[in-house]
Image: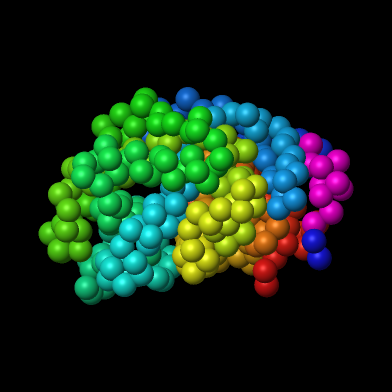
Amino acid sequence: MPTDFSDLTHRLPAWVDACRVHTAQGSVATYIPELAHAPRHALGITLHHRSGKSVSAGDSDMRFTLQSISKVFTLLLALMDRGEQAVFEKVGMEPTGDVFNSMLKLELVQPGKPFNPLINAGAIVISSLIRGDTPEHKSQRILGFIRDLAGDDSAAFNEDVYRSEAATANRNRSLAYFLKDNKVLDADVEPTLDVYFRQCAIEVTCAQVARMGLVLASDGVDPATGRELFPKRFARIAKSFMVTCGMYNASGEFAIQVGIPAKSGVAGGILALVPGELGIGIISPALNDKGNSTAGVHLLRQLSEQYDWSMF
């Protein structure tokens, strides 16, 4: 059944207030030092409906960096730049069950390519497939794509987060050099990592993420303009990965409890969508042990149960 948007608008602030208590169960990410400054008890949400209506509650104006949410959109851009065959020669289509920055299966499973584009190793390879003459050119193309999807040119790189991530990314460098040695990563390591760090450091709001989600929910067509921003086939690929891999190694649990495509990031953001109907952006920086927003997941579960959103 379609969501009763007027009912949701009326009840959303109370649900956000009720779910805020779950922030106490999580911790803000500290392995990227700049993210440690985020307010632990923040929780905000925006929902964009296909009709053009939107509703926000809580700390929805808080700006945050996309981090791993960006992986969905670099995948789409790489598919448009290179095509399916070239992309999936370099990354697989399967969930791993491992943490997002694990190297384990790169070593154990031949031919050593990343299992999917939404883990760090896969996203680094995807970043290398974005077309551009320089890392700066590639990064600007990614930012331009994000701005088109968000319908807002205020999305921008957070230079402090970018520098903080680049200075502390020993695990990601290890992954990248291993991929290079395995001949999965063809491009040079450091320029590729520069593109990856910059895409993760794109700063947005809940409203921008929700509108990006609505374009995905609409199979690549921006409902506000009627413009196709990416092909329907690629939208379906991205949404499939969000269901199977989007919430790290808690994706199966999330599919059972919430049942909609979603992608989280370690800044506390969540991109989610109800196919054909809604785009959702959430921020709540306190994370659980799987790297997902604690209060954000609780809020999505409550909304999904109330409005019967599960695809299953």
In the rendering, at what x and y percent does residue 118 appear? Answer: 41, 57
Which residue does the image show at 29% across and 44% down from the upper left? 138
Tell me: 8 left or right of 248: right
The quadrant of the image that shows the C terminus is bottom right
Which residue does the image show at 23% across and 68% down from the upper left? 112
Q: Residue furthest left?
A: 181
Within the image, what quadrant is residue 211 found in? top right
Which residue does the image show at 28% across and 68% down from the upper left? 86
Q: Main secondary structure of the magenta part?
A: helix
How is the structure coloured here? rainbow
Tell me: 294 left or right of 121: right
In the rendering, at what x and y percent does residue 247 appear? Answer: 51, 56
- Decide whether residue 11 is among the magenta residues: yes
Which range is magenta?
3-13
- Decide whether residue 64 is among the magenta residues: no
Residue 71 sits above or below residue 11 on the image: below
In the rendering, at what x and y percent does residue 26 appear? Answer: 56, 40
- Label count reads 0
Residue 137 sits above or below residue 124 on the image: above
Which residue does the image show at 73% across and 62% down from the upper left? 309
